[in-house]
Amino acid sequence: MKQQRLWLIGIAIVIGLFGIHWWKMNDYYVSKEWKKYQRLFHVAAYSSAHEGYEKLYDQLKHKPAFLYEYGYCLHKLGKYDESNKVLEESAKLSSNPMIYDVMGRNHHLKGNYTEAESYYIKSTNMVPNRMLPYYFLSKLYNESNYKNPAKCKEMAQLVLEKEKNTQATTARHMREEARKLLSLHR
C-alpha cells in the first residue's frame, strides 16, 4: 500500500513537472513570436504586425504591453472601435497614460469630441507633466465642431510650458503647432 502511494506521488510529480516544462516552453515560443511582430510594429509595418498580434491575442491578452501595441496597430489602421476595445483591456491591467491618449485620438478621429476630451483629460490627470495630451486637447478645442478658443489657448500655453528641456523632433513640432494655435486665438 505504501509503495503504491509513493508510486502515484512520483507519477503526479513527473506529470506536474512535464506540465510546467510544457507551459514554460509554450510561453517562450509565444514570446519569441511576439518579438518578431514587435519588430514590425517598431518600424511602422502596422498591417503585418496586426496580423501577428491577432494570431497571438488569445495567448497574450494578459500582457498590457501586448494589448497596447495591438490596440495601437488597430488605431494606425483606422480600426478605431476595435482599437478602443483592445485598449480598454490594456487599461484594466496597466496605468500607462498613453493608452488614454490613443483612445482619445480614436474618438477624436471619429468625431466623438466629448469622449475624446474625457480620455485626454484622464491622461493629463495620470501624469500631469506630459505634453502630448495637452497638445491633443489644444487640437480638439480648435476643431470647427468643438471650437473653444479659450480652452484651446490655455492648452496650447500648457504645451509650451511642458517638457521645456525636451528637444525631440516631435516635441518641437508640438510646440510649433501650439504657437500657431496661440497666434490664431490672440
Image: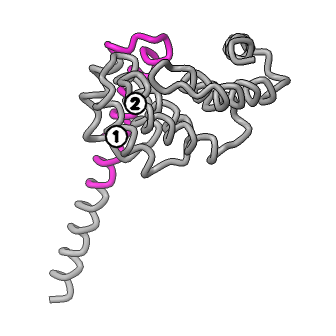
Q: Quadrant of the N terminus?
A: bottom left
Residue sitting nearer the eye, 2 or 140 = 140
* Residue at the spot 38% in from the left edge and 21% down from the top edge: 37
Residue sitting nearer the eye, 44 or 20 = 44
Q: Secondary structure at mark 1?
A: helix
The residues tagged by marks 1 and 2 sit, at their Cα atoms, a distance apart of 26 Å
From where the camera sits, is residue 113 visible?
A: yes
* Residue at the spot 57% in from the left edge and 41% down from the top edge: 121
* Residue at the spot 32% in from the left edge and 13% down from the top edge: 47
Q: Which mark is residue 107?
A: 2
Residue 34 within the segment the image draws in magenta:
yes
Residue sitting nearer the eye, 107 or 62 = 107
Q: Position of residue 20 (x, y in %)?
A: 32, 54
Q: Which residue is mark 1?
A: 60
Q: Secondary structure at mark 2?
A: helix
Q: Position of residue 31 (x, y in %)?
A: 39, 34
Name the image quarter holding residue 158: top right
Specify the amino acid type for callout 1.
Answer: Leu
Q: Position of residue 136 (x, y in %)?
A: 58, 26
Residue 47 within the segment the image draws in magenta:
yes
Left or right, 164 with reference to 35: right
Q: Quadrant of the C terminus?
A: top right
Q: Which mark is residue 40?
A: none
Numbered range of the magenta stretch? 19-48
Left or right, 152 with reference to 114: right
- 78 relative to 121, above or below: above
Left or right, 63 with reference to 54: right
Q: Nearer the viewer, mark 1 or mark 2?
A: 2
Specify the amino acid type for callout 2.
Answer: His
Name the image quarter holding residue 179: top right
- 122 relative to 55, above or below: below
